Amino acid sequence: MASSPRAGGTERASTAIRVEAVSKTFDTAAVLHDLSLDVRAGELLGLLGPSGSGKTTLLRIIAGLDAPDRGRILFGGDDATGLPVQERAVGFVFQHYALFKHMSVADNIAYGLNARRRADRPAKAEIKRRVGDLLDLIRLSGFGDRYPSQLSGGQRQRVALARALAVEPRVLLLDEPFGALDAQVRKDLRRWLREIHDRTGQTTIFVTHDQDEALELSDRVAVLDKGRLEQVGTPDEVQENPVSATVLKFLGDSVEVEAIAEGGHVSVRGRATPVAAPAGLIGPVKLYVRPWQLQLVEPEAAHLSGVVRSSYRSQGRQRIEVEEAGGHVLAVEDFDGVRYAAGHPVGLRINGGYVFA
Amino acid sequence: MPAILAAPPGVAPPRPARRFRRPSVLPGFGLSFGYTLACLGVVVLFPLAGLVAKASGLGLGGIWRVATDPRVASALRLSFGVSLLAAFVASVFGFLIAWVLTRYEFPGRKIVDAAVDLPFALPTAVAGIALASLYAPDGLVGAPLDRLGIQIAYTPLGVFVAMTFVGLPFAVRTVQPLIAEIDKEVEEASATLGATRRATLLKVVLPPLVPAVLTGFALAFARGVGEYGSVIFIAGNLPYVSEIAPLLIVIKLSEFDYGGAAAIATIMLGISFLTLLAINLIQAWSRRRFGYV
């Protein structure tokens, strides 16, 4: 990947889009609750959340395809809430491409330019040149005369992206852009999207339910759950300092351990852990531990103990499932090179974790 | 739709040896293929061949003489001309009906939807009597129109009304499933790209429906040409004015002029065949071009 100027910590970036206290209800189900979010100019923002979290609805409201019940959408300081889709100058890429099947690839890409009023429409030669440039950008030069039915899924999605970019949108909105593609194509397209973003500096929001995708691609990640914004931050920030158990659980595997908070520290089964407790938090708490924060140790140094249930290796990591006496299963990621047989008794030390007030 | 990656130019895939039957796990190909051919032959091709054989008794010159007989020629003109017109009108209004029925929710939609099939289901004579009594100069619709000086029954206009009536369900039912399948996201994509509602409709929504509209048109046309029962009552059957070709066949038969009847029938068969062929060619072209019907 090209060295990406990740926006983390830079304050120079101005706000391109402001979502202000937006609420939306479909029939009787509330989809968005009083949600506010600032999108910085030029950033690649990932909207991450489980299905039903309202992320697609939020994207559609920004595009003007749905209207919010309450709240406002601001584009660069101007209220765009009542602006019809056609005038918002957004590029929208749908999960299932939504290409115009009866038009050639070139006509698909040129569609937005041809749709302009005569006064704003570029000359024919200029449109042709821009379509050519975009075909180069999506690495489909020479495919201009093909029809969408003659392309693979990944190629179609690239055409959809070029079509959205052709109108030079204020913001590019991608709704699960890689959701319908298989794993390998997905991976390639991810890297490619990041490259295109770095080259064009296009403000981009994309929706995904895939943590890896969001963490790999985004300058900042916004984690949504049940119509509320849980946390916004750089991928590192949200991973290192998740604000809630919901965010933590959604960003990756974790195990829950009963613990006691006391004097600013968290202890498990009477043994102190390196995890600091938030000020004022005293009493029984839930400690969330990532698999790689657990280490296999001798029983006398262990916070937890149990027997190995299964173990496998994949891509340089060893994944071991340990069953505690009560039947509670813990996933451990530790690479000590020892192969554990099922039933082998082990001790586990907690090297880190998260508690939430 | 499966993603099909077209082979790059110049790299032709190895061509399998031409075989009549592709290997398949489905059993019974021989039996079912034979059955299909036999059915098609006995039910469809055999009678048509008999018809042509009968007509050929007259010789080409004889058929030509029948075709150029002024009364026959005028009946053929009426049948094909009015069918074309009726199919056109049925296609336009059928499209609108299909559009409204699929795109909008309203009370009574199901009932209207079912009513579309009535011309299918109605015995043609019943439809013919209903239309004739409705449009006759003393009929419910005919009377006020008659006062305006417009006469529908017993004129080519009456033939047109009846043919539109019977053709309408074809026009509706062929486009309806395609309208239902229109991808909402495609329209939304068009809107986000700045296209007005009108442009979206004209450039994105309607073009893919053209092949289906053509199919509906072809079916309505074929039905109109062949229609007998619902037309003859309202047509009045004045020679040279409102006499349709199928009726002429019946007249010839009742005069025991089997050769003449077969000749008219053969001419109709030929013209219908050419029309359907033309429409099929247009569809094949659109399929090649867009990769779907």
Image (cartoon, coloured by chain):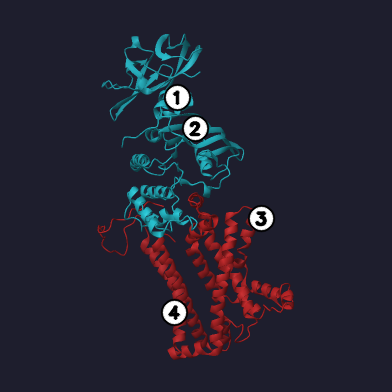
Looking at the image, residue B205 sits to the left or right of residue A148; the answer is right
Q: Position of residue A173 (x, y in %)?
A: 46, 42
Report, in whole angstroms, how far the alpha carbon at label 1 lies from the one at label 3: 54 Å
Q: Position of residue B4 (x, y in %)?
A: 35, 53
**Image quarter in which the N terminus of chain A is found:** top left
Q: Which residue is mark 2?
A: A224
Q: Are marks 3 and 2 in contact (CB under 8 Å)?
A: no
Q: Are marks 1 and 3 on the same chain?
A: no
Amino acid carrying mark 3 in the image: Gly
Quick one: which chain is cyan? A
Query: What crowding class fits label 4: few (fewer than 14 Cα within 10 Å), some (14-19), or many (20 or more)?
Result: few
Query: What crowding class fits label 3: few (fewer than 14 Cα within 10 Å), some (14-19), or many (20 or more)?
Result: few
Mark 4 or mark 3: name the one nearer the start of the chain. Answer: 4
Judge whether B125 appears above or below A14 on screen.
Answer: below
Report, in whole angstroms, how far the alpha carbon at label 4 lies from the one at label 1: 81 Å
Report, in whole angstroms, how far the alpha carbon at label 3 lies from the one at label 2: 42 Å
Q: Residue at x 52, y 40 (%)?
A: A57
In terms of secondary structure, where does tag 2 sit? strand
Q: Residue B108, labelled with which disc?
A: 3
In terms of secondary structure, where does tag 3 sit? loop
Q: Quadrant of residue A298?
A: top left
Q: Which residue is mark 1?
A: A242
Mark 3 chain:
B
Q: Residue B49, labelled with which disc?
A: 4
Looking at the image, residue B69 sits to the left or right of residue B60; the answer is right
Q: Are marks 4 and 3 in contact (CB under 8 Å)?
A: no
Mark 1 or mark 2: name the one nearer the start of the chain. Answer: 2
Amino acid carrying mark 4 in the image: Ala
Report, in whole angstroms, how far the alpha carbon at label 4 lies from the one at label 2: 71 Å
Q: Quadrant of residue B172?
A: bottom right
